[in-house]
Image (cartoon, rainbow, N blue to C red):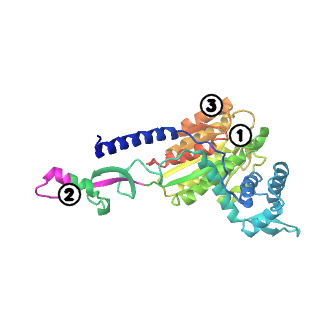
Amino acid sequence: MEQPIERFELLLHTNRKECMKSTKRNKGFLFKQYDEPFQSPFDKLFDIFKELITHTSGDFDEAIDWLRQLDREFKLTTPAYTIDDFIADLKDKGYVREKMDSAGEGGMDITSKLEKALRQHALDQIFGKMKKGRSGNHKTNHQGRSDENMGDFRSYQYGDGLEKIVLTESLKNAQINHGVGEFALAENDLVVEDTQFKSQMSTVLMIDISHSMILYGEDRITPAKKVAMALSELILTRYPKDSLDVIVFGNDAWPIAIKDLPYLQVGPFHTNTVAGLKLAMDLLRRKRHANKQIFMITDGKPSCLNMPDGTYYKNPMGLDPFITSKCYSMAAQARKLGIPITTFMIASDPYLQQFVDEFTASNQGKAYYTGLGNLGEMIFEDYEENRKKRIR
């Protein structure tokens, strides 16, 4: 006759086997129909509108015309919520305001609230494509006393804050060094968590606005504009001690305010790379940050120079040695000032790549030959990487 304990063990063993079988049966993937996250009618149209207003360089009427065309084709609205309702919500929420021009005709103008929303939208788009990394601000390779923990330990040094001492590791060292019988804690036993300095960066972003940026049926200025908006929003929100200046260059070069980025357009210009570099270096000379850099987005060869008498020297045919030599000289000058130049070339002509290679060698900087699709991702990754370096 079985004992009660033996029957209980047998029952337990049987239940465990059944449970394991059930667990094996439940392994695998469960597929079901995708349910989109809820979006209000305004939010759905607002996402599309932000794209359109960026492409139209802030032209509200043109963006709304495009939105109406998309609505006719893809049925974006319903009788309960129309495009006119959307425009009314834009005004109520403070994204646009009514304006009156000198001729007395009314219209709509975008507000600073929408300008910020466009920068955030561009930032979300670019970071949405990037792989997630470790959280926190950029770091240098220099260790020492600061407020950015690395997760590594080192011996205590005079001047380290008491809050940095790792008690468990320090007590373990005391027991190893002095034994358990008579407990003693000496300075040599103390361990602190290592830290890294947070660096600060001054960046100038140069954007080519020559006519070739919209030639051949390809809109190259809008991706460049989005990168500028996203980079500015990143710095304003995550790295407020960094600085970003945006300059555009065509026949001449001039700075533009961050709030004016949505309105950026190309013009009937040649490409005066030297003027852009001169202005960029002038801006960076005034910065007190140790780390300085220039990002240059361009798709064409340098074809213009400012002459001493105030005229322009222009040559759109091929690579002019007179112009390219000035570019190489500016690149070398930037290198002497400790300012690396990273060129993002959004064209694939072999002779242009040869120019960029020589230009990069003169500066000892970097060059990327990239399409428009991953331009933002490459610039952001390079920005993150460069802030780890301290330029002496």
The type of residue carrying mark 3 is Gln
Taking depth in this image into account, of 339 and 125 the one nearest to the observer is 125
Residue 132 image offset from top left, x and y in percent? 52, 47
Please state which of residues 302 and 313 is positioned toward the viewer in this rendering.
Answer: 302
Location of residue 65 by image quarter: bottom right
Residue type at mark 2? Glu
First reached walking from the N terminus: tag 3 or tag 2:
2
Quadrant location of the N terminus?
Answer: top left
Return the mark for residue 303: 1
Relative vertical location of residue 88 with respect to residue 325 in this rendering, above or below = below
Helix, strand or loop for disc 3: helix
Disc number placed over residue 216 in the picture, else none: none
In the image, is residue 167 above or below residue 19? below
Measure the C-alpha gap from mark 3 to mark 2.
60 Å
What count of labels does the image hold?
3
Going from the N terminus, do you reach mark 1 or mark 3 first?
A: 1
Query: Crowding at label 3, few (<14), some or many (≥20) Cα neighbours within 10 Å?
Result: few
Q: Badge 2 is on which residue?
A: 187
Q: Nearer the viewer, mark 1 or mark 3?
A: 3
The quadrant holding residue 120 is bottom right
Q: Which residue is mark 3?
A: 354
Q: Is residue 306 magenta?
A: no
Local packing at callout 2 (Cα closer than 10 Å; few below 14, some 14-19, many 20+) is few
Residue 24, percent from left and from top: 48, 38
Part of the protein shown in magenta: 173-197
